[in-house]
Image (spheres, rainbow, N blue to C red):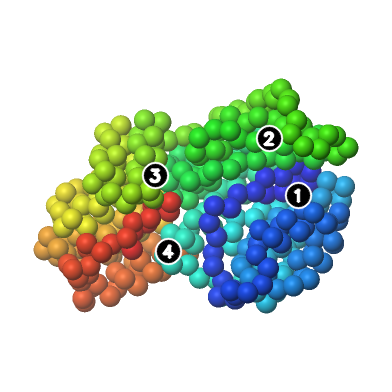
Amino acid sequence: MASHTRRVRFDELNYFCGRASFTGAGVVDLCHDIVRRAETIEDAVKIANERPVASTWGIMVSSASERRAVVLETTCKDVAVLEHMPGNHYLGCANQHHHGRVSGGQVAPMPAWFEHSSAREMRLRQVVDKSLSKGGMSAGDMADLLGDSVDPYDQKARPGGCMIAQGISVKSVVMEPEKECVHVSVGDVPTGWGPYLTVPWSWDGEVGLVDMDLQELQINNNAPRPNQEGYSHFLAATRMHMDTHDLKAVAGALDCAIAADPNEPTYRFMRGVICLRDLQFQEGADHLDHGLAHEESPFRRAQLLLWASRVADQLKLTENAVQLRTELLSIRHPHVGEYQAAAEREQKNRYPRRKFPRVVLNFTMAEAM
């Protein structure tokens, strides 16, 4: 998100566009080239168009002197320039292409991938619009934004899925060019929670390693956060799953998260799916049903309904399975179409028992496929 001279951007994961290539400039190299050579936004656009770019990406470029910003939306065949919408004083980049020339052909390996980008952008706009209505955002406000854990639909603090603050966020930075300083988080994940240290710079300063006393940026930390004890165990489960894929240990960490925060649907969903992988259908059903009793966000509810209907089929609870699928098919949300298509198929041909042990978990997006 860029707002004149202060700027902040988040980019853990992004959509993938079919117009990608294994040749061309790497995104990191392109960004380095822009930083090294560009003095204006026009320079940045020209540099991005000098040669094909291999990957699909959204590159935020802002100019303190010009008091404007653009997003360069790349594919291997094009670089589209997204500018401020009329009446907007900020520009967001949440890893999905919006420019008409490049927005087509975006694909994702699972429904939650789309929700992950779109919902985080929705929450970003909710916070920024509210802040601008009250006079604007300080650097501390922007740091708070990077630590935001609120679901944009139910307005509750959640541990995982489509929050801005992610359990894999390893870099959170707020830049203030007009004050010649950058605020860098030195905290554990999610790094958006801080603390932030303010690092000054001088364009004509000493080159090389410089020792300095740094001040901590004061942030409000007023945004709601998930239950801290439960969240710490969820973070542990996320790390275990990424590092070792030891599902027995992951399940143990989730059990601890549930003990600390028993009504958090995310924990119930992930733990329930692990039960299904082990063909423990009744225990899995108990977790999914408990999650449904508390889930209000439409996408996440659709997700729970699909898996709960599959378990009901396995337990021969036919009427219950029909009710669950009926509710799923009634949900109106842009990213639940794949879940609904599966529910329609499974009205005639239920999800095969042999597939449960092969279900893949994704802790970053709180998804199972």
313 w.r.t. 2: above or below: below
- Between the C-alphas of marks 1 and 2, the distance is 22 Å
- Picture quarter containing residue 143? top right
Measured from the top left, where is residue 249 in percent x and y? 26, 43
Indicate the amino acid at tag 2. Answer: His
158 w.r.t. 341: above or below: above
Residue 369 is left or right of residue 200, and the answer is: left
Q: Nearer the viewer, mark 4 or mark 3?
A: 3
Which sits earlier in the primary sequence, circle 3 or circle 1? Answer: 1
Q: Does dot 2 land on a helix, a strand or a loop?
A: strand
Q: Nearer the viewer, residue 135 or 33?
A: 33
Q: Which residue is mark 2?
A: 183
- Between the C-alphas of marks 3 and 1, the distance is 38 Å
Q: Does dot 3 land on a helix, a strand or a loop?
A: helix
Q: Does dot 4 land on a helix, a strand or a loop?
A: helix
Q: Does dot 1 land on a helix, a strand or a loop?
A: loop
Which sits earlier in the primary sequence, circle 4 or circle 2? Answer: 4
As drawn, the residue found furthest toward the front would be 208
Indicate the amino acid at tag 4. Answer: Pro
Q: Which residue is mark 4?
A: 111
At a point 49% along the width and 56% down the height, the residue shown is 116
Marks 4 and 3: CB-CB under 8 Å?
A: no
Is residue 196 visible from the viewing direction of this image? yes
Measured from the top left, where is residue 102 in percent x and y? 65, 72
Residue 214 is left or right of residue 366, and the answer is: right
Q: Nearer the viewer, residue 207 or 311?
A: 207
Q: Which residue is mark 3?
A: 239
- How crowded is the residue under tag 3: few (<14 C-alpha within 10 Å), some, or many (20+)? some
